[in-house]
Image (cartoon, rainbow, N blue to C red):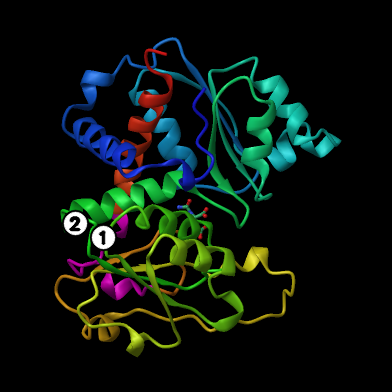
Amino acid sequence: MHHVLSCDQFSRTSLEQLFVLTDEMRVDGKKFSTSLAGKIVATIFYEPSTRTRLSFEAAVSRLGGSIISTENAKEMSSAIKGESLLDTIRVIDGYCDAIVLRHSDSTAAVDGASVSLVPIINAGSGSGEHPTQALLDAYTIYKYKNNIDGLSIAVLGDLRFGRTVHSLVKLLSLYDDITIYGLSRDVIALPDEYVTYLSQKGVSYIPCRSLADLPQDIDVLYHTRTQTERFKNTDLKIEEFIINQSVMKNFSAHTILMHPLPRRNEISFDLDDDKRSVFFQQSHFGMYVRMSLLHNILAGS
Ligand code: NCD
């Protein structure tokens, strides 16, 4: 059994092995075209998704496996009839070899794993974690920077509800001499549990209030969308930090601009042709990272 629930689970060695396999998937994916032959993967999504679900499904197909799916499980599964998540998992685990699960509850993946007879892969759990996104984010950083040790990285936007940030900072903490700048409005600052986590791992975390607080030669800007759907107070208006051409003029030629996507207006379209904008490449890497992960979990076991 090999659940993927949180980035706590990864070691630097396991991450680097995954990166090596991901390189292989990109260069010679055909070599793995039957690695999931005879396997069925269920993608069960209680929240909307474009990249995560489709890249997982493309990954399964490219590895020769089959997919069963509910893309709007909140309404189109028996959840609408009042079935509990755990009952649903107990049923689906009899149909498939792994379950890729996205849910609005931050403990959903862990809860599901407590009853599942097959591996659960957390594809985003509420405002908790999104480990597979962080794997592709770390891979992207590694590809563009050749090394993660010693980097300075700014996480921007919704650090409170943004699950991709929560998972990413955990992976970054596996590396040496990392500095993380956190730029957000106060109400959506990084929760204390992650600030404490970083300090325990020896990562320097610097909260910021303005784009001008970030060093011009920073290695990575990782922007995120305000997760308005998670706000209890729906009247709360958060002013975004907009990154556009004039902002990027202040950063070095080596600063890469990342985003898990979907973006709204926090990264302006005038930056799409900027060599430093790597967010579409980042999303493409996701499929190969997920192929590697699925291969590790399901092939040959
Ligand atoms: C993110 C998510 O679902 O957490 N998207 C993704 O998986 N690439 C980010 C978001 O929704 O803002």
Q: Secondary structure beneath disc 2? A: helix
Q: Is residue 160 above or below residue 173?
A: below
Q: Is residue 122 above or below residue 214?
A: above
Left/right of residue 228 with respect to residue 232 in the rendered view: left
- Whether label 1 lies within 8 Å of ligand 1 gets the answer no
Three-letter residue code for mark 2: Tyr
Left/right of residue 296 with respect to residue 229 in the rendered view: left
Q: How many marks?
A: 2
View extreme (right): residue:
82
* Label ID, residue 297: none
Q: Position of residue 152 (x, y in %)?
A: 27, 70
Residue range in magenta is 267-281
In this view of the protein, which residue sits in the foreground, 87 or 201? Answer: 201
Q: Is residue 246 above or below residue 32?
A: below
- Residue for badge 2: 144
Is residue 221 magenta-colored? no
Disc 2, disc 1: CB below 8 Å?
A: yes
Q: Position of residue 129 (x, y in %)?
A: 54, 51
* Label ID, residue 278: 1
